[in-house]
Image (tube, helix red, strand yellow):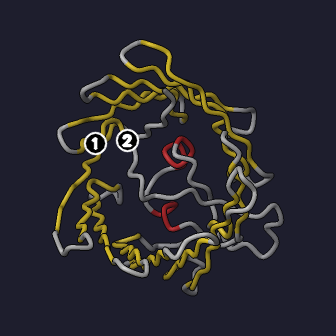
C-alpha cells in the first residue's frame, strides 16, 4: 500500500512558478500576513465551502489554523490545527487528538513523525540546491514507500511521482507569508502559484486563474477541470 501522509492540511495545494522569473516581485519586502481564506466547491448539483482562520503569536508565527466546513447538506464542522515552536521553528503540530513532531538538521526538516493509531515516520532527502527530492515513509517501523520529485530552475515543483506535471505564474504564493521555507519545502509549496496541472494520463488538465493585489499576492483563485463539472474558488484575506 502506498500513501502519502504529510503534516499539513490537504487543502493546501501544490503551487509553483515558471522558469522565467523576469518581472517577478517575489523579493520585494512586505508586512502582509494571510489572515483568512475561503474555499467554495461547486458542481451542477452540490455546493460546499470551508473558511480557514489563521492566528499568529507576537513574533508573527502561526499558532493555529481553524477550518469551518459547511457540507452540501448545510452541516457545519470545526477543526483546529495547533503549532508549537522551538527557536522559531515548528516543532510540533496537534490536530484531532493526533500530533506530529519535526526533526531538523540546521534549517532543513529531515524527519517528521505522526503519532496516531499508527506511527508514521517520513524521512526527507535534499539535493545540492536544497530542494526536497525524496520522501521515505515507514508505518509502525515497516517500510511503506518512497516518493521522488523534480523541480524547475526556481526551485518550484515540476514533476511528482505518479506523473503529475505543473505549470506556474511568477507571482507570490500566499502561504509564503505563513510558513518558513523549511516547512514549505517538505510540503512542496513553492514560491509561486499553479497555472495548470496535467495528470499522468495526459488528457486531464486543471486550469487555475487568479486576481492579485498590488503586492503580487492572489486575492482570488479559480480552478476549472477539463473532464469535470466541478469548480473551486478560493478567496484570500490579508492584514
Q: Quadrant of residue 225?
A: bottom right
In the displayed structure, would residue 91 be above or below residue 195?
Answer: above
Q: Which residue is mark 1?
A: 84
Q: Is residue 101 above or below residue 50?
A: above
Q: Whole-Å distance between the Cαs marked 2 and 1?
A: 6 Å
Looking at the rendering, which quadrant does residue 124 occupy?
top right
Residue in the picture at 29% in, 46% down: 83
- Within 10 Å of the Cα at label 2, are there few (<14), some (14-19), or many (20+) other Cα atoms? many
Q: Residue 85: x, y in percent?
A: 32, 41
Q: Is residue 206 left or right of residue 118?
A: right
Residue lying at 55% horizontally and 24% vertically, measured from the top left: 145
Q: Residue furthest top?
A: 141
Is 173 rendered above or below residue 101? below
Give percent across and percent down for residue 156.
69, 53
Percent across and percent down for residue 49 are 32, 73
Residue at the spot of label 2? 90
223 or 218: nearer the eye? Answer: 223
Query: Helix, strand or loop at disc 2?
Result: strand
Question: CB under 8 Å between callouts 2 and 1?
Answer: yes
Side of 200 relative to 88 (left or right): right
Quarter of the figure that contains the C terminus? bottom left
Residue 187: x %, y % from top left: 52, 46
Q: Residue at x 39, y 79 (%)?
A: 237
Crowd tier of the residue under label 1, counting other residues whose Cα lies within 10 Å: few below 14, some 14–19, many 20 or above: some
Q: Tell me which label, 2 or 1, sits earlier in the chain.
A: 1
| Label 1 element class | strand
The residue positioned 64% from the left and 72% from the top of the image is 226
Amino acid at each position: 500500500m502506498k500513501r502519502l501522509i504529510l503534516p499539513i492540511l490537504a487543502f493546501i495545494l501544490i503551487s509553483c512558478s515558471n522558469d522565467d522569473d523576469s518581472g517577478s516581485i517575489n523579493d520585494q519586502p512586505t508586512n502582509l500576513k494571510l489572515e483568512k481564506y475561503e474555499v467554495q466547491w461547486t458542481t451542477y448539483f452540490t455546493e460546499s465551502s470551508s473558511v480557514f482562520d489563521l492566528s499568529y503569536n507576537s513574533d508573527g508565527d502561526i499558532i493555529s489554523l481553524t477550518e469551518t466546513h459547511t457540507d452540501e447538506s448545510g452541516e457545519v464542522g470545526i477543526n483546529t490545527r495547533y503549532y508549537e515552536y522551538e527557536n522559531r521553528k515548528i516543532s510540533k503540530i496537534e490536530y484531532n487528538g493526533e500530533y506530529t513532531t519535526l526533526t531538523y538538521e540546521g534549517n532543513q526538516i529531515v524527519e517528521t513523525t505522526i503519532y496516531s493509531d499508527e506511527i508514521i515516520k517520513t524521512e526527507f532527502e535534499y539535493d545540492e540546491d536544497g530542494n526536497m527530492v525524496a520522501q521515505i515513509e515507514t508505518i509502525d517501523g515497516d517500510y511503506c514507500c518512497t516518493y521522488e520529485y523534480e523541480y524547475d530552475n526556481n526551485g518550484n515543483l515540476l514533476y511528482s511521482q505518479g506523473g503529475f506535471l505543473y505549470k506556474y505564474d511568477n507571482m507570490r504564493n500566499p502561504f509564503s507569508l505563513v510558513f518558513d521555507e523549511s516547512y514549505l519545502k517538505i510540503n512542496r509549496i513553492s514560491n509561486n502559484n499553479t497555472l495548470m496541472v496535467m495528470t499522468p494520463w495526459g488528457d486531464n488538465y486543471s486550469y487555475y486563474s487568479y486576481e492579485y493585489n498590488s503586492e503580487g499576492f492572489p486575492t482570488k483563485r479559480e480552478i476549472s477541470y477539463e473532464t469535470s463539472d466541478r469548480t473551486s474558488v478560493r478567496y484570500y484575506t490579508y492584514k
